[in-house]
């Protein structure tokens, strides 16, 4: 006989596991993996990593999240966010922020992932409590060949964790990557826009039509990948696409 578990109970179980994982990993600094005993009381990072962590102050520009003085207009180039309603990220993609992203992506370090997910939760919470309170969470997808090869998808891991933390619906198949692409930072990539052009399709058009989507990835650099994903979601009928990442270049 199949045992039915309510969505609320599943969410509590996942939250409990996440809390246990954070406790178990607390002995090591998520930024460098060294003994965290050098951290201040109640801090997650060791003192060296805290010194090299660059946060993006809040509140900032309601479109790109860059810090603003009271009454100041944003001078950032929003062309990188064409087709994207807003982007928010808690950290700069340098120093400890870059190391956290790399440790999750390349070393499957879930302590680094938990740190990023928690920071992303607080940054995107105003949106998730307001116009995004019924948003669907969709990760930037990897190609099937990469999934088979590496057996870890950092964007999907972050998206699932964020959905649990915010109480939003996670749609893992919301997007699919139709062809393998080079990493955007690969020196062979001379045009990032062309590298991902037409590489994404909506895998669940019936789910995203008429809905607000919160697209999740580990980092935003040029924005080409996020724009391509947002275009595919809007073509499938999504009314609005917002993006949250752990860091921004």
Image: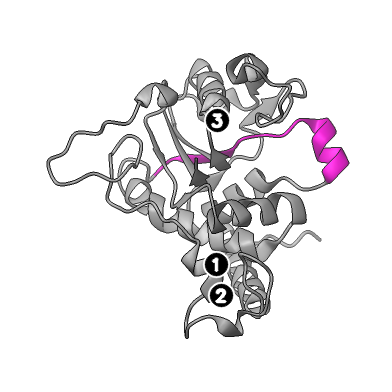
Residue numbers of the magenta segment: 134-150
x and y percent of residue 1 in the render? 81, 61
The crowd level at tag 2 (other Cα within 10 Å; few <14, some 14-19, many 20+) is: many
Disc assigned to residue 46: 2
Vertical comparison of 150 with 8: above or below: above
The crowd level at tag 3 (other Cα within 10 Å; few <14, some 14-19, many 20+) is: some
Residue 217 visible from this viewpoint: no
Mark 3 or 2, which is nearer the eye? 2
The crowd level at tag 1 (other Cα within 10 Å; few <14, some 14-19, many 20+) is: many
Q: Residue 216's quadrant in the figure?
A: top right
- The residue that disc 1 covers is 49
Q: Residue at x 44, y 40 (%)?
A: 135
- Give yes or no for residue 235 being in the magenta stretch: no
Vertical comparison of 235 with 151: above or below: above
- The residue that disc 3 covers is 207
Q: Residue at x 66, y 72 (%)?
A: 21
Instruction: Report if the CB atoms under discs 2 and 1 are less than 8 Å apart.
Output: yes
Instruction: Report if the CB atoms under discs 3 and 2 are less than 8 Å apart.
Output: no
């Amino acid at each position: 006989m199949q045992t039915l578990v309510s969505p609320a109970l599943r969410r509590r179980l996942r939250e409990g596991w996440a809390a246990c994982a954070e406790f178990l990993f607390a002995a090591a600094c998520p930024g460098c993996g060294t003994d965290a005993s050098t951290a201040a009381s109640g801090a997650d990072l060791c003192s060296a990593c805290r010194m090299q962590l660059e946060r993006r102050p809040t509140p900032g520009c309601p479109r790109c999240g860059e810090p603003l003085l009271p009454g100041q207009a944003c001078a950032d180039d929003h062309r990188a966010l064409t087709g994207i309603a807003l982007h928010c990220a808690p950290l700069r993609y340098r120093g400890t922020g870059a190391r956290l992203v790399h440790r999750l992506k390349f070393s499957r370090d879930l302590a680094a992932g938990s740190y990023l997910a928690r920071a992303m939760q607080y940054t995107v919470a105003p949106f998730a409590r307001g116009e995004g309170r019924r948003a669907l969470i969709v990760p930037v997808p990897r190609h099937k060949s990469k999934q088979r090869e590496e057996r870890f998808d950092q964007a999907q891991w972050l998206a699932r964790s964020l959905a649990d933390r915010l109480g939003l619906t996670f749609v893992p198949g919301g997007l699919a990557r139709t062809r393998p692409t080079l990493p955007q930072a690969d020196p062979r990539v001379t045009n990032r826009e062309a590298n991902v052009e037409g590489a994404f399709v909506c895998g669940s058009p019936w789910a995203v039509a008429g809905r607000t989507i919160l697209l999740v990835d580990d980092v935003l650099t040029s924005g080409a990948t996020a724009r391509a994903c947002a275009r595919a979601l809007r073509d499938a009928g999504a009314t609005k696409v917002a993006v949250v990442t752990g860091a921004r270049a």
